[in-house]
């Protein structure tokens, strides 16, 4: 009897460990927010997007990090321009830009974290702000700059740890692209849709390719070409002023515009279908869980 009890106890402990390993392995303890880009103003993200980011990261008093590395220059509505430097010497207006970002996001303080050096990105000192952060936002620009600088470094690891400990990682345009496992336009300075050797992203979303500015930039058919070459992928196209918020194995559409899903199947006369704000989608089954009345219509 005693031996049976011991075996049952060991089996229970093994099950608990397996569940813990599974939760850790799926990398989905926190929240992701992928925005379609279109500007650097509160309104450009779409209704409720930044509010969700701040609230889920712990509120305005939490620690926030902003990574501008994808960009060559960011301009706020106020006219303030910040140009991420090519060296580790901070731009002269870094503190001013941090204050302006904090005001735009509606938080007490925003810390800019930027480098173009892989050695710096792999250093303990550089990642200190990430270890305190409840929320990280990655700017738009070129996803190739993010990949070239951060892939395989301590910085990438610590960004993922923010997520794994229940924080929020958000990104707009290139910052959304890099969240997938497959990167489009991964070569810095070149608008090549699929660039061999430059296709790996951070992989928060496995077997997923993200394409922003979808309707505004008339990119609706681009992910069709990507899935022709990589049919194992799920494509998510996000228009400007739209976003998806990912929790566990599901995402919900936020904002004021649409999101397109590409699953290598024909849907009427298209190879994708539309989701309106409020729609909920399962990444596990690749099926719509909650739809809105007008979803599926042409933009």
Image (spheres, grey):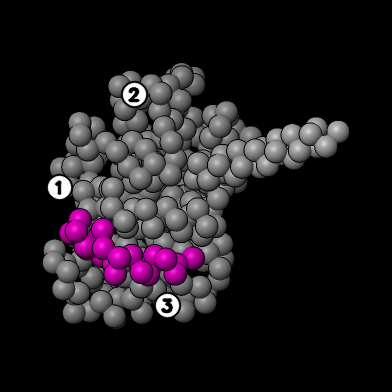
* Label 2 sits on residue: 230
Region rendered in magenta: 114-134
Going 54% across and 29% down the picture, which residue do you hit? Answer: 286
* x, y percent for residue 32: 48, 51
* x, y percent for residue 291: 62, 37
Going 43% across and 44% down the picture, which residue do you hit? Answer: 204
* x, y percent for residue 19: 62, 40
Is 122 colored magenta in this rendering?
yes
The reply to whether residue 150 is in sight is yes
Can you say which quadrant of the picture contains the N terminus?
Answer: top right
* Label 1 sits on residue: 189
262 with respect to 151 (left or right): right
Counting residues from the start of the chain, the first of labels 1 and 2 encountered is 1
Going 53% across and 45% down the picture, which residue do you hit? Answer: 24
Question: Is 40 rendered above or below residue 8?
Answer: below
Between 180 and 43, the one lying in front of the other is 180
Give the class, few, some or many, for how many residues have Cα within 10 Å of label 2's Cα (few <14, many ≥20): some
The label nearer to you, 1 versus 3, is 3
């Amino acid at each position: 009897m005693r031996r049976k009890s011991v075996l049952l106890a060991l089996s229970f402990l093994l099950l608990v460990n397996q569940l813990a390993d599974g939760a850790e392995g799926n990398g989905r303890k926190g929240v992701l927010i992928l925005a379609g880009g279109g500007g650097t103003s509160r309104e450009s993200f779409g209704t409720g997007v930044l509010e969700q980011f701040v609230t889920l990261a712990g509120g305005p008093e939490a620690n926030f990090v902003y990574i501008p590395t994808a960009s060559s220059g960011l301009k706020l509505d106020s006219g303030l321009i910040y140009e991420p430097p090519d060296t580790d010497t901070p731009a002269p207006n870094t503190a001013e830009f941090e204050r302006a970002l904090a005001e735009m996001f509606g938080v007490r303080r925003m810390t800019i974290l930027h480098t173009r050096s892989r050695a710096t990105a792999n250093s303990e000192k550089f990642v200190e702000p990430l270890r305190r952060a409840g929320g990280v936002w990655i700017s738009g620009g070129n996803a190739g700059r993010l990949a070239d600088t951060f892939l395989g470094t301590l910085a990438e690891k610590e960004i993922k740890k923010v997520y794994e400990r229940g924080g929020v990682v958000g990104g707009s345009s290139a910052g959304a692209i890099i969240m997938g496992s497959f990167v489009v336009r991964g070569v810095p300075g070149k608008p090549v849709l699929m660039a061999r050797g430059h296709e790996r992203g951070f992989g928060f979303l496995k077997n997923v390719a993200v394409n922003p500015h979808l309707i505004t930039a008339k990119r609706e058919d681009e992910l069709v070409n990507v899935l022709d070459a990589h049919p194992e992928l799920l494509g998510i196209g996000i228009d400007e002023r739209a976003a998806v918020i990912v929790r566990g194995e599901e995402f919900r559409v936020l904002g004021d515009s649409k999101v397109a899903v590409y699953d290598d199947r024909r849907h009427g006369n298209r190879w994708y279908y539309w989701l309106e704000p409020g729609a909920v989608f399962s990444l596990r089954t690749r099926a719509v869980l909650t739809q809105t009345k007008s979803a599926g219509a042409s933009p």
